Amino acid sequence: MTPRVLKPLASILALGLLAATPAQADMSREEFQKLVRETLLEQPEILREAIIKLEEKDKMAQQQEFAKQLKQQSAQLFANRTDGIMGNPRGKIEMVYFTDYNCPYCRRMNKSLNEVIADEPELKVIVKDIGILGPDSVQAARLALAAAQEAPRQYEELHQALMSQQRVQTAALATIADKAGLDAKTLQQTADSKDIADKLSQNLSLFRSLGLNGTPALVFPDGTLIPGAIDAAALKDLLKDKKS
């Protein structure tokens, strides 16, 4: 149980026991603590019910904050022209995809997305490149963001090349870019620019404002959130609901 849960839980239990104990004013601190302990040992369901109630309240608060941030950040999420795109750039079905090139779950998610994109011509995947798994991830994200800016039509090819690595390392980025048909030297100059640094910070800020703490994560305009990798079949079922 986390400290975030324990602190309010202790307060709730104490208030409940005080209300149920008319003579609490005559109790010492030690006596009251003993009463709390004995009550919880005799009726452990009190603790379980309190935990469930607090978790439900916390989940509801998170959902409300997510919905608020989704509305406030909608333009940055779905209409930012500096993002890399997978699938159909003019597709009617949109989703935002937060990813890190050194995340193994992102590689799994990427395979699912490729399969779904092949079968769904109206799918537009807006990629929010972030680097949360160390310096190599940061440099890979910056390179991808540079490609989205300098050569948007080749962005997806670079994205796939980066995702095909077991682990992306900064020293290999130039080779990866060249193999993807891009001018690595020019692209790296853009990747090192302040504009790209600001874009990466913006993506990370969006990620955090939505309450996300891990990649991959899919976000749809209607508020549907998929935190973590899912297989192609599950994603196809989800898209069926979006089209209906």
Image (cartoon, grey):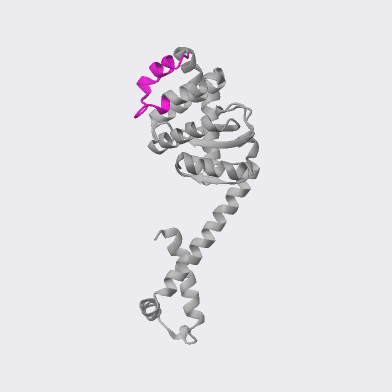
Q: Is residue 152 visible?
A: yes
Going by the image, does 63 lie left or right of 174?
right
- Using the rendered view, name the quadrant where residue 166 is placed: top left
Quarter of the picture holding the N terminus: bottom left
Q: Position of residue 64 (x, y in %)?
A: 60, 53
Q: Position of residue 231 (x, y in %)?
A: 45, 41
Magenta segment? 162-182
Q: Is residue 81 above or below residue 103?
A: above
Q: Is residue 214 above or below residue 87?
A: below
Residue 177 painted magenta: yes
Q: Is residue 221 above or below residue 27?
A: above
Q: Position of residue 107 (x, y in %)?
A: 41, 34
Residue at (40% x, 81% y) in the render: 28
Going by the image, does 56 lie left or right of 136?
right
Residue at (50% x, 66% y) in the render: 53
Quarter of the picture holding the C terminus: top right
Residue 25 painted magenta: no
Residue at (54% x, 38% y) in the render: 205
